Amino acid sequence: MCRDPPDQARLRQLAEEQAALRRVATLVARGEPPEAVFAAVLEEVGRLLPVDLANLCRYEPDRTVAFVAAWGTAGGRFPVGSRWPLEGYSLVGLVFETGRPARLDRYAGSSSGPLGAAALEAGIRSAVGAPIIVEGNLWGAILAGSTPEQPLPPGTEARLASFTELVATAIANTESRASLARLAEEQAALRRVATLVARGTPPEEVFAAVTEELGRLLPVDLAGMARYDPDGTLTYVGSWGKAVDYVPVGSRWDTEGQNVGTVVFETGRPVRIDRYADAAGSLAAAARAMGMRSSVGAPIIVEGLLWGTMGAGTTREEQLPPDAETRLVSFTELVATAIANADSRAELMASRARIVAAADETRRRIERDLHDGIQQHLVSLLLDLPTVQAAVPPGLAELEGGLSRIAERVTGVLDHARELSHGIHPAILSERGLQAALRALARRSAVPVELDLRVERRLPDPVEVAAYYAVSEALANAAKHARASACRSNSARMTRWSGWRSAMTGSAAPTPPKDPD
């Protein structure tokens, strides 16, 4: 049997290795998915190295390792998707602890723990591993093992490590693209919510929109939003996904135990729960009933005070991404703005209602003072004047004429006072209601008026006052500006006008209607 000289064998090995690296590099440059790169790398490793199996794994934050690709007989013992604890002594654990390439030449005498036992069951006698470093952080490892008695040749781990940089580049590229896509989706979702807030959409609609956007944006099955009440309870104001059945809108819960709602209430900070087995309280029991495995929550701060909390959770085995809390906070700020805007509008409408009520009461008081005070005095004076005039001796025509002029002036002042009284708040409106007051307006109008009144009961004072003055102003405008030959009332439009004034006590700013006919 003819063998190549050592130098030629080495050159051939180097050429094969470079060709394999070029093939993988081409896949990376094309932007192929990581799964395709992983499979190609392991196949090239299996062809280049004297090994029987190879796999690629990812280290998880909870000190477990997840296998994401396999070649040869590795797929049977370490299937893709399986997770193993980093316990005992194994090649996977050794790479994890050191962050460097490593080898085990005798598995039978040196390994322990679940991974070590599984490797022995797979017949591995020796193995090498190399870390995958992505942007300075340990991401995972490539592992290759052999079943023959003799250990793998020296330098095998170095040859294995030459592939890890390409794998790391593929992972980094994919994560960058995913990060950009995720950022674009997040910004689009935030813009949609911000548009609702800017439009003054009612908070209830904003809450529903936010929980839905959050559920679509994060890898979660459920999302919810709750308000902290003064009695120490928590009321849900928004639910999405599986949360709808377990924590519906309007449901109230105690803030007790160890759960997202309670921890946010106590700390006022974002929180994460990765294992609900240790959680406690009624909310934790509801979470377990939903099958929740992990969740995150963030506080809703309105004008410096803790208003409520927003949370999201998953029933999957995979934990939520490390930045889930940060992404949650982006939405809580918009929710806080919506709540603050709604509170400001409510305060403004309440203030307007108080001003309207105070003005109406002031008009009534002035009308009452005019009627019961000045008008009564003027009437008494007019009643006394005839008696004085009758007592004037004959021949004092000048005095009698002066008294007559005084009587005329007092009568004029009395008429003026009555007009002021009617303009401020007509007594007939208070005493007999809107129908009688409008009929009186129609009789005094300079333009003939046809009334269509369908109000059969007394309405609240603010409504009657609003309707009365709307009709009064409309008749005055018709007489002064419209050159109208007649006026006709419309009960539907008049109701709209009165409703506009009464809406001043509501939560939404009303739009004044057009002038009635």
Image (cartoon, helix red, strand yellow):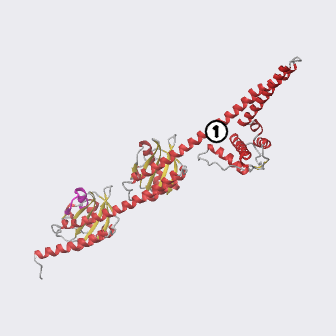
Residue in front for this viewpoint, 422 or 431: 422
Which quadrant holds residue 394?
A: top right
Indicate the position of residue 38 as horizontal and vertical percent values: 30, 68
User: Magenta segment: does it hold 395?
Assistant: no
Left or right side of 285 for 58: left
Whether residue 54 is visible: yes
The relative height of residue 162 versus residue 347 in the rendered view (above or below) is below
Question: Most extreme residue toward the top, as rendered?
Answer: 393
User: Magenta segment: does it hold 95?
Assistant: yes
The relative height of residue 29 versus residue 113 in the rendered view (above or below) is below
Magenta portion: prevailing SS class? helix
Residue in front for this viewpoint, 328 or 439: 439
Indicate the position of residue 288 as horizontal and vertical percent values: 45, 54
Q: Secondary structure at mark 1?
A: helix
Residue in front for this viewpoint, 139 or 456: 456
The relative height of residue 48 versus residue 383 in the rendered view (above or below) is below
